[in-house]
């Protein structure tokens, strides 16, 4: 083979590798299509970090005790921060490549139990989107994309609600974030 043919093959191979790398980066790190938007804004309940409130079958049948356990603004912000920290620890800095599916499923269940405790109406659309993702994660097999998008939701909410710096990255996946930045 001539040197020209060898160089052409090498350049073509590098171009193909570069394209494949760009596709993978785009797949894992770029904004995913929005999760199905909820058709209704539901009022949610909130409780302390580790406690669980059994929900009645109808929101109109809530007991006084359940209502007292709703998250206030500070508790909501702590919950968002705690979940974001979990995802930083389990998916950040390349850890997403070796997810513990059982751990992710268990945490998705914890998220679902606590989401209904958030009472801020401005967060309800994002809560509904997070619920849909968490419902998928809690079932087997765990899809990496769903876990990464849960992380992005909590990342963006943490930046806005807790003034976290977000390592300089804002994904723009939340409805609340869109409204927040439009009003700023």
Image: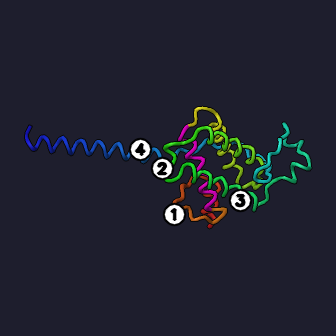
What residue is disc 3 on?
78
Q: Residue at the location (73% across, 48% down)?
A: 115
Q: Residue furthest left?
A: 2
Which image quarter: residue 21?
top left
Front label number (2 vs 1): 2
Work out whether mark 4 precedes mark 2 in sequence or the reverse, and give the earlier one.
4
Please name the residue that numbered disc 4 is placed on.
24
Quadrant where the C terminus sits is bottom right
- The reply to whether the C-beta atoms of the residues labelled 4 and 1 are less than 8 Å apart is no
| First in sequence: mark 4 vs mark 1 | 4
What is the distance, in whole Å, between disc 4 and disc 2 at their CAs? 13 Å
What is the quadrant of residue 8 in the picture? top left
Q: Nearer the viewer, mark 3 or mark 4?
A: 3
Residue wearing tag 1: 168
Query: Which secondary structure type mostly characterizes the magenta part of the structure?
Result: helix
- Residue at the spot 63% in from the left edge and 66% down from the top edge: 163
Residue at the spot of label 2: 94
Q: CA distance from mark 4 to mark 1?
A: 22 Å
In the foreground, 61 or 25: 25
Highlighted magenta segment, given as a residue range: 143-159
Badge 3 or badge 1: first in the primary sequence: 3
Q: Counting residues from the N terminus, which is met first, the one under dot 3 or under dot 2?
A: 3
Between marks 3 and 4, how big is the CA–CA gap? 33 Å
């Amino acid at each position: 083979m001539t040197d020209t043919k060898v160089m052409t093959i090498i350049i073509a191979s590098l171009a193909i590798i570069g394209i494949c790398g760009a596709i993978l980066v785009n797949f894992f790190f770029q904004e995913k299509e929005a999760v199905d938007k909820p058709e209704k804004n539901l009022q949610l309940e909130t409780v302390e970090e580790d406690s669980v409130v059994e929900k009645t079958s109808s929101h109109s049948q809530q007991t006084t005790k359940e209502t007292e356990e709703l998250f206030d603004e500070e508790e909501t912000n702590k919950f968002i921060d705690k979940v974001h920290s979990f995802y930083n620890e389990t998916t950040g800095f390349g850890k997403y490549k070796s997810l513990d599916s059982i751990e992710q499923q268990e945490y998705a269940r914890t998220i679902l139990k606590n989401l209904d405790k958030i009472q801020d109406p401005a967060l309800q659309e994002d809560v509904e989107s997070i619920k849909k993702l968490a419902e998928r994660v809690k079932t087997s097999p765990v899809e990496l994309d769903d876990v990464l998008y849960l992380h992005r939701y909590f990342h963006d909410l943490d930046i806005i609600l807790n003034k976290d710096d977000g390592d300089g990255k804002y994904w723009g996946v939340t409805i609340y974030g869109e409204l927040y930045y439009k009003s700023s």
